[in-house]
Amino acid sequence: PEGAHSALRAAGRALKGVRMSYENILFTIDAGIARLTLNRPDRLNSFNDAMHAEVRDALARVKADPSVRVLLLTGAGRGFCAGQDLGDRAVAPGSEPVDLGASIDRNYKPLVLGLRALPLPVVCAVNGVAAGAGANLALACDLVIAAKSASFIQAFCKIGLIPDSGGTYFLPRLVGTARALGLALLGDKLPAEQAAQWGLIWQCVDDAELPVVTDKLLASLAQASTRGLAAIKAALQASAGNLLPAQLDLERDLQRALGNGDDYCEGVAAFVAKRPPRFTGR
């Protein structure tokens, strides 16, 4: 309904350029770009329940705000994210066991699925170590750029667990079964340069260049056809579970819907006129 769309537009105008007040994350929306920074640097930005709740709230704001055309996820300080804060649910031999499955259902599963389902590109800038669930949180994003000093560690085997937060899903699809098993069974540190060579991430850059390259990418995505990018994201995600006929049908349906949109007309007109397109976004 038009009233609902008007309310969303008004909410987007209210949020634009405003820094939200959180205790465990930093969050801003400006010029079509939402920036979400995990902000527990003294704990290498590891997750506790409070940070999960704040990230969920920020992602809900992104989804509800039609002015947002790209999301950046990064970390404060010297690391991206060390995964779960084990001090937040400390256990000792002989103590009452912790239901880790409940933690996944309550926190990590909604987080990963929420990032994957956002109808816009999600860029992850890995500024330092990404370990455990932190590594797999990065892999849940659409484009991962890492500083050369960054690294990825599937640390779960060190504490008798399996890679979660989508790790067992993303790893073999990105680097193949042999490398996925090596990373998961050994828990060795994978330097960012090697992660890029293996195809685990999109790009590795010099540390000093990470903010510059990231900002340039964000600006480009914020000016692109957000609806078209969302369809690309959805089609590529669906391809993992589709046979070719079903994927061709999905391509047909998405192409038909996009062909009826304003951005396609604008894109063709701009191409013919040899000028930059002026896409409207969502």
Image (spheres, helix red, strand yellow):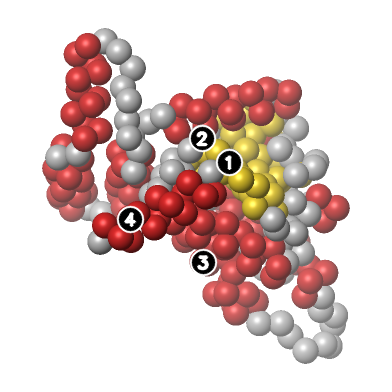
Disc nearer the start of the sequence (3/1): 1
Pick the front one: 239 or 121: 121
Q: Residue at x 14, y 40 (%)?
A: 260
Gap between marks 2 and 3, in whole Å? 27 Å
Circles 2, 1 touching at the beta carbon (< 8 Å): yes
Question: In this rendering, would 92 be left or right of 120?
Answer: right
Tag in front: 4 or 2:
4
Of the numbered discs 2 and 3, the one sitting upstream in the chain is: 2
Q: Which label number is shown at residue 5? A: 4
Find numbered disc 2 in the image and state the secondary structure of the residue it sits on. loop
Q: Earlier in the sequence, mark 1 or mark 4?
A: 4
The residue shown at (18%, 53%) is 246
| Mark earlier in primary sequence (4, 3) | 4
Which label sits in the foreground, 2 or 3? 2
Q: Quadrant of residue 236?
A: top left
Residue 190 seen: no
What kind of residue is marked 4?
Answer: His
Can residue 227 be seen here? The reply is yes
Q: Which residue is mark 3?
A: 110
- Residue furthest to the top: 274
> Which mark is on residue 2?
none
Q: Position of residue 170 (x, y in %)?
A: 50, 52
Relative image position of residue 65 (x, y in whole percent): 45, 51
Please, is residue 29 above or below residue 99 in the view? above
> How far, Cα to Cα, is label 4 from label 2?
19 Å
Distance between the alpha carbons at the discs numbered 4 and 3: 25 Å
| SS at badge 4 | helix
Tell us which disc is closer to us: 4 or 3. Answer: 4
Residue corresponding to mark 2: 31
Q: Secondary structure at mark 3?
A: helix
Q: According to the image, label 1 marks what residue?
A: 17
Between 2 and 158, which is closer to the camera in this rendering? 2
